[in-house]
Image (cartoon, rainbow, N blue to C red):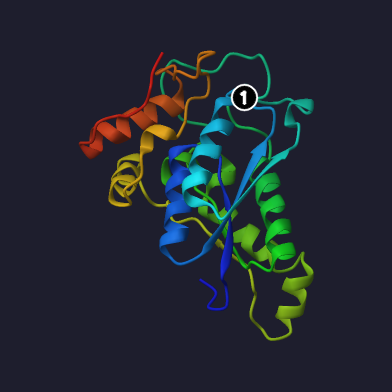
Amino acid sequence: MNAASKSAVILLSGGLDSMVCAALAREAGFEVLALTIDYHQRHRVELEAAKRIATLLADRHIILPIDLSAFGGSSLTSDSPVPKGGVEAGIPSTYVPARNTVFLSLALAWAEASGARDLFVGVNALDYSGYPDCRPDFIAAFEALANQATKAGVEEAFDGVGPFTVHAPLQHMTKADIAREAARLGLDAGISHSCYDPAPDGGACRLCDACRLRSRGFAEAGLPDPTRYQ
């Protein structure tokens, strides 16, 4: 953490991981600037979840529209079916091209504009095996970029200290660890949403990768699963 920081930009999707991430930032003493990206994802119910979470944890919340469905390339931004046969190795069709690079770039822009020097993103160990933009090397590379690509970074570089830090506090946690952390923080995990292919009423499908990982996490943590399923 940068000692001079008073606020941090948190990428808040509406899922359990980003909810825990926001709560950890607040626990660490940061003012929480929550950024939610409306990228025309098929699971748009997560935007409502982000609003609920932000009401509890954020000092300011921005929902920023950017239509990544115009590019395609993902089952989350198209009519292509979401895989439901079980969690598989490799990069699944739910990968959205360069999503975390785009999202962190927008978070960096808000951080620089607001004077914040800390960014939080809820990537974790179960994600980086599949999604390349959830891996530790990516987070380290983006932090280095942030301190080269901004006015604040260039000016601070003269003192030999880069001002921006990208925090990924869940990076080496399992889903069970994250579920336990939510309980420790006193969070109502039921207001978060993780499903990639929910029913029209928002009920989770139970079968997509996100549902399977979330359900398994609560089970392995020995905690009741508060998810509302179809």
Q: Nearer the viewer, residue 14 or 105?
A: 14
Question: Which residue is outermost to the bottom?
Answer: 159
Q: Residue at x 29, y 34 (%)?
A: 218
Task: Assign a secondary structure to mark 1.
Answer: loop
Question: Quick one: label 1, few (<14), some, or many (20+) residues within 10 Å?
Answer: many
Task: Give the quadrant of the C terminus.
Answer: top left
Q: Which residue is mark 1?
A: 76
**Eyeballing the image, is 38 above or below 137?**
above
**Eyeballing the image, is 63 above or below 81?**
below
Q: Residue at x 55, y 18 (%)?
A: 82
Q: Is residue 129 left or right of residue 35?
A: left
The image shows residue 128 at horizontal and vertical percentages of 49, 43
Q: Nearer the viewer, residue 140 or 200?
A: 200
**Eyeballing the image, is 36 above or below 83?**
below
The tally of labels here is 1
Q: Is residue 1 left or right of residue 181?
A: right
The image shows residue 99 at horizontal and vertical percentages of 66, 40
Q: Residue at x 42, y 51 (%)?
A: 170
The image shows residue 2 at horizontal and vertical percentages of 55, 74
The image shows residue 135 at horizontal and vertical percentages of 52, 49
Q: Nearer the viewer, residue 39 or 80?
A: 39
Question: Which residue is outermost to the left?
Answer: 222
**Eyeballing the image, is 85 above or below 4?**
above
Q: Is residue 133 left or right of residue 145?
A: left
Q: Amino acid at mark 1?
A: Leu
Observer able to see residue 92? no
Residue 86 sits in quarter: top left
Observer able to see residue 219? yes
